[in-house]
Image (cartoon, rainbow, N blue to C red):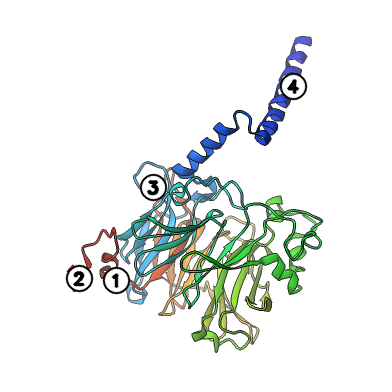
Amino acid sequence: MIDRAAKILFMLSLMVFVLLYGVVAGAFGWFPRGFVLRAVEQGANLGISPSQSNVQPNLRDREGVHVEKPEKVQPGMTLITSLWDWDDSGDLEIGAKLIDMERQTIHSWRLNRGDLFPGTIQLKGPDVGRADIQGTYLFPNGDLLLNVVYVGAVRVDACGQVVWRLPEFTHHSISRAEDGTFWIPATHGEKRAGSERYPEGFPGFGGKKVWVDRMLHITEEGEILEDINVLDVLYMNGLERYIPKALGGEYPVPEEINDDVTHLNDIEPLDSAMADQYPLFEAGDLVVSLRHLHLVFVLDPDSMEIKWHTSEPFIYQHDPDFIGDGWIGVFDNNYDLTGRGAMLGGSQIVALQPHTGKTEIRFPTQRSDPFYTDVRGKWQLLENGNMLLTEARAGRIVEVAADGSTVWEWIHAPVGDSRVPDVTKGTRYDLTEKEVAAWPCSSLDSADDWQ
């Protein structure tokens, strides 16, 4: 009995010693800190393996393209960002594919996080486990601007070679303004208790450090023009009340959400060609989505005035867009604590008209197939009035007509034990095979062969 107690005491003492040594070794650079960091860096350079949160059970018994109503489909090609098993090895890597309406891959960007940001060890951020692509913008010459989540923004050419990189912990959407500049969400590489405006700490936080979201305005060459602190904007406009409304209550929310207070996920500028249709706003105003506060607002980035805001009827929303005639369309995840939206009926597209106060549910309708993603999700209003919806957690992109019925869909091929990777975004582009054939590294015949 004494020997057993002595052994237990020895093991506990050894565990305490190892723990204390690990802390001191990390602080002073003692062995084996250098080996650990090099191993982590090599892992980053080889490409970070996706966490299980990036791969979900397959919900459907089909894959690839299915054309339900070809006469109602918006012509063009669809850019898809996801994780891919490029060489049938079972390993998933980040990248993008451009497909035609019949499923054929017209062009692909096979990417590697370590190549995009060599030597970068990014172990910080609210969603550090999601080593994938979020926002994208496709240039006419085949260049692709993308966000590697909580690492940075990078522009690659059609061959996947880096043109420039911006290691500013960017994430989520990329939106282009009419002058060719971009608005991109970002955070800092570490939690912060305050800002230049609030050097003593954000009021009411009691010195607590949190992830502070930023709104970056950058040039086409990747230079930062503006860097706007989202928490500062809320306090300046008296909207800090949404923080306790969303994060308070009798039951405490998870610590990671407490730290990730706002979770900025979209910034969309209003073009001058559409500005006259919005009596409350002006060209250059930004519609912004803060997921964890269930808050959408329109901001004048020059004066920092929030001209309009609402938190209804969203639950963890994404992707607000100016869609014309005074309307703002929003991808409402409508997260209801269930696996497939069993309580509230699934995700929806909500349209709001700020100058009249009207609200409409544009999708789903009685003709719609089940659609739900508790996180992520994007939508695009197409020229013919259809909507292209990204059901991220189902690995699915679906085009629906104005009446809500499905006209076209694409579903990611399952990997491993019948699971599908998240699809972070699907975007329809008005491209022809001749235009893509002119890109470097195009797998199509030369553009000169097209009449």
Give the alpha-carbon distance from disc 2 to disc 1, as whole Å: 10 Å
In this orientation, does residue 103 appear?
Answer: yes
Residue 158: x %, y % from top left? 34, 60
Which mark identifies residue 85? 3
Q: Which residue is mark 1?
A: 432
Say which element carries label 2: loop
Which mark identifies residue 13? 4
Q: Is residue 405 above or below residue 131?
A: below
Q: Which quadrant would the N terminus be assigned to in this image?
A: top right
Q: Upstream in the sequence, badge 1 or badge 4?
A: 4
Contact flag, marks 2 and 1 (Cβ < 8 Å) = yes
Kind of residue sitting beneath label 3: Asp
Q: Upstream in the sequence, badge 3 or badge 2?
A: 3
Give the alpha-carbon distance from disc 4 to disc 3, as whole Å: 46 Å
Kind of residue sitting beneath label 4: Ser
Residue at 52% x, 71% y is: 364
Contact flag, marks 3 and 2 (Cβ < 8 Å) = no
Q: Upstream in the sequence, badge 2 or badge 1?
A: 1
Give the alpha-carbon distance from disc 2 to disc 4, as whole Å: 75 Å
Kind of residue sitting beneath label 1: Thr
Which mark identifies residue 446? none
Kind of residue sitting beneath label 2: Trp
Residue at 46% x, 56% y is: 395
Say which element carries label 1: loop
Residue 105: x %, y % from top left? 31, 59
